Image (cartoon, rainbow, N blue to C red):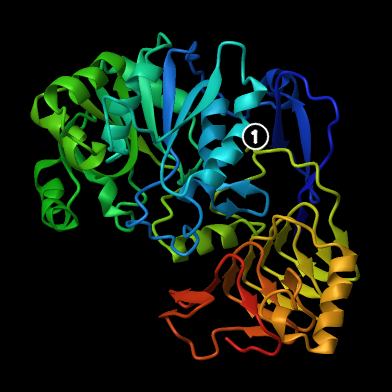
Amino acid sequence: MVTSQLCLPSHTIPSCHLTLLTSERVRRNKTLPFKKLHSSLFQSNSHQQHTTTDQSVAAIIFGDGSDSKSQLYPLTKRRSEGAIPIAANYRLIDAVVSNCINSNIYNIYALTQFNSTSLNSHLCKAYSGMGLRRDGLLQVIAAYQSPDHHNRWFQGSADAVRKCLWAMEEHPVREFLVLPGHHLYRMDYRQLISAHRNANADITIAASTAAAATHDPSFGFLEFDSSNKVLAFRFNSEVINCFSNKFRNCGSHGSASMGIYLINKDVMKRLLEDYFPNANDFTSEVIPGAVSVGMKVQAYVFGGYWEDMRSIGAFYRANMETTKEDNMGYNFFDRVMPVYTMPRCLPPTLISDALITDSLIGDGCIIGRCSVRSAVIGMRTRIGDGVVIEDSVIFGSDIYESEEDIVEVERIMRNGDEERKQRDMIPIGIGQHTRIRKAIVDKNARIGKNVMIINKDKVEEGEAKCYVIREGIVVLLRGAVIPDATIL
C-alpha cells in the first residue's frame, strides 16, 4: 500500500476552511467549508444518538508538558509535544483538536508554555483565524506574567487553568473539558458529556481499560464501582501495584486514567480557588483532593485505541501502525471523524521510478529512484537515487533548497572549500545510495551520500552529537548533518 497525501491550493478561503482527509488508495486532502462536513460530505455508520453540546462545553488543551519530564526527547528539544509531526502531514495536537471539532465543541483554549513557538504558530495558522463557527473559537493562551502573578510562569496544569480562568469565563459554559494535547486517540466527547450529565457528576474522568498495564503512571489510576463512581484515585505506580489486588476481592474495577477530565464550571472554580488554591497539578493534587472531599467523581470507560506517547518507542510504533493496511491503531483516513490540520498548498509529490510499499508520503516530496518500505515520509522530503528506507519515520523539511543552491553545494564539495563543508556541503534531504532502517529523522536533516543509519552495533540506549538511540531506534536531531559514508 502506498498512501500519498496531497494538498490542493485554495486561492479563495471563505470564513470557515479546514483541511480534511478523504479516502481511496491514493488519498487527497481537500479544503472544504466546515459547515458542510457533517451534513453533506460524511455519513456516519454509527446508530448511536448524541445530544449536541450547544456551546455549553469549553475544551482546555495542554499543548506541552514540562521540558524536564518529556519522554519524547530529542523530538522535544525545539518543540513541545503537541507540535511533533506525525503521519507525514499532521501534528499530534491535530488529533485532539479534531476530536473537539467532530464532537461539536467549538470553544477551544490551548494553554502553552515550553518550547511553544512552533505549536503556537501551527494552531494560529490552522484554526484560530478560520472561525470554526460564528460563536466559536480556538484561542491560544501562552504563559504570561502579570501584576497578580509576578515572576511566576505556569507551575502545572491546575495553576495554568487558575491563571487563565478570567479569560475562559467570558463564555457561558457549563463544563470545562481538560485534555492533554499530545495523545493519539479518536473519541466522541459527546458520549463522555452525556454520561457526565446523566450521572449528575461534579467531575468525570476518562479511563482506558486497554492500557492499564502500559500507560504512563503519571496520569493516575482509578478504582470505581459498578456504577462507575470513583472510589479512589492514585498516581503512584507502586501504590497501583498493591492497589490492584483489591479489585478482584471487593468487586470494584480499575482502569488507567487518560488525563481527560470533564469538570463542572462552578466545581472548577471552587477546586482551584477555595479548596486547593495552591495546587499546581490536576493529577497529583486536584483530582485526588476532589475525591477526598466527597465530590461526585465518575469514571467514563473508553475502550478504543489510545496512545499516550509515553516514549520514543511508543511514538515510533504509532507511526508504523499508520502504514499497515490492516491498521489496528489510529486511523487517519476515517471519513466519519476526519483529522484536520493546516492547509499548506504544497505542490504534488514527484516520484521518479521509485518502489514504494506500505508507506505514507506527505505533500511536496521529491523522490528519486529509490526503495521505500514501511515508512512515513514527511512533507518536502528529498530522497536521492539508490536510497533504501525501511521501517522509518522521516519528518521532512521546512524549506526547499533551490536547484541553484544544490549545484553550488556540489561545486563547494568538488573544490574542497573547508569553510562551508561542516554544514552546507550536504543539501537538506537524503543523499544518494544511503540506507536508513528503524530510525526517526527529525526536520531539516542533511544526510550525505552512501550513509548507513542502521544501528550497526545494536545499541538499545545511547547518545551522540547528532543523534540518540532509544529502544534500539536511531533518532537524528533536527538539523543534523551526517557526512558522506557515515555508518551509525
Q: Please state if 449 lies on the left or on the right of 277 as rendered.
A: right
Q: Is residue 300 above or below residue 447?
A: above
Q: Please state if 231 lies on the left or on the right of 132 as rendered.
A: left
What amino acid is labelled 1 in the image?
Lys
Point out the residue furthest to the front here.
419
Mark 1 element type? helix
Image coords of residue 443 (percent x, y) = 63, 61
Q: Is residue 357 above or below residue 399?
A: below
Point out the residue furthest to the top here.
172
Of residue 391 and residue 11, the one placed in the foreground of this image is: 11
Image coords of residue 160 (percent x, y) = 32, 33
The residue located at (57%, 36%) in the rendering is: 123
Quarter of the image where the C terminus is located = bottom right
Image coords of residue 55 (percent x, y) = 48, 13
Can residue 337 be seen in this snapshot? Answer: no
Q: Is residue 288 above or below residue 416?
A: above
The residue located at (31%, 27%) in the rendering is: 163
Of residue 329 and residue 338, the one placed in the foreground of this image is: 338
Of residue 123 and residue 98, the one placed in the foreground of this image is: 123
Would you call the spot at circle 1 few (<14 residues within 10 Å), some (14-19), or many (20 or more)? Answer: some
Task: Classify residue 410 by image quadrant.
Answer: bottom right
Residue at the disc numbered 1: 125
Can residue 15 be seen in this snapshot? Answer: yes
Quarter of the image where the N terminus is located = bottom right
The residue located at (89%, 74%) in the rendering is: 407
Image coords of residue 238 (percent x, y) = 14, 58
